[in-house]
Amino acid sequence: MTVMTDSALPLNANGVTLSLNELIAYKQQSIPWMPPAGNVWSSLSGRHQSRRLGKGMDFSEVRQYQAGDDVRSIDWRVTARTGKPHTKLFSEEKQSPVLVYIDFRKSMRFGSSLLLKSVQASHLAAMLCWVAVKQGDRVGAVINTGQKLIDLKPTGGNRGALKLIQQLVEQHNSLFTGAESKDVITNEEALQTLCQLCPKGSDLVLISDFLDISNAHSVWLHQLSQHNRVKMAHISDPLELGQTDYRGTEKVSNGESTRWFNFGSSSSRKRIKQEFTSHQNNLEQLAMDHAIAWASLSCGQTLIKQLNGMNNE
């Protein structure tokens, strides 16, 4: 059961398919989320993050204190040894590739209200892509269509961003033409591939509903997080939380089995929410165990609305 509404849709979007104009629009919309004024990830996660996504500062040198230097950077050991105040100087880390993993498999091609989960995943990928490009980073992607993995090597500038979103549009929309095929590539296989393809020292963002991710996949998450700054963006639909105004009985499917479900039963809707919340809590704990940043995003609201709402809390 998929019921779409065109109310409050993002610019140039219909909620089901993707267009270039739809994702290019995030180039302008990304401006408020450029560090230091804003940060996409900290707004999504609700936690304070460093000013640059995953970036830090490298120690450069110690020199004698000068008027205007930040007193918090005074090197007290050198100051005590020399008898004159000295301060530490830092330089920003060298820029690293930004790699985005986008899941387009069957469970992601679902939406009960505003957008398909795959569409929301693409919107987030586009936003992160434009922010990275404006910071001078190279951007790449691995797109999982369920039938194949599309590997886009990190490329700098607008060329890299346009190449990425062009592939998002083409691969996503091609999945709605012809007969629907069963997924043959799991998230586990995708994680294994990422371990091989991801350049060490990358900012890696995994965007999926993670329905088939569990503790059994710890080895791959551990390997990725050892060499990269990894983040997980969990995409969900309101119906997965039992949130729907529909009160009839419908035939539903999880992609493997089909059964009738009574949406008029409050206990049934409550059971859906409990199962979803339990899985989400397990995923969040899994991320925490590997020091992976975690954020949740609903496809029942626009990306910008959720960024603004969480940013203003």
Image: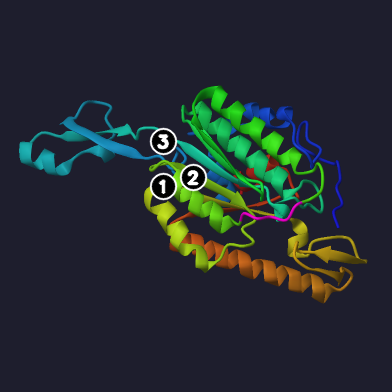
Q: Which residue is mark 2?
A: 204
Question: What residue is pinned by disc 3?
Answer: 96
Give the CA separation, mark 2 to mark 3: 10 Å
Q: In the visual, does 237 lie left or right of 48?
A: right
Disc 3 residue crowd, few under 14, some 14–19, many 20+, Cα 10 Å? many
Residue 294 seen in this snapshot = no
Q: Amino acid at mark 2?
A: Leu
Q: Point out residue 185 in the picture as x, y percentages from the top left corner.
A: 62, 54
Asked whether the viewer can see residue 130, the reply is yes
In the image, residue 2 sits, relative to residue 62, either above or below, namely below
Q: Marks 3/1: CA distance?
A: 10 Å
Dot 2: what SS?
strand
Q: Nearer the viewer, residue 71 or 167?
A: 167
Residue located beneath label 1 in the image: 228
Q: Are marks 2 and 1 in contact (CB under 8 Å)?
A: yes
Name the kind of residue labelled 3 in the image.
Answer: Ser
* The residue stretch that appears in magenta: 181-185
Whether 22 is drawn above or below 115: the answer is above
Task: Let me know if residue 182 is in the magenta part.
Answer: yes
The percent coordinates of residue 238 (x first, y second) are 76, 57
Residue 256: quarter of image: bottom right
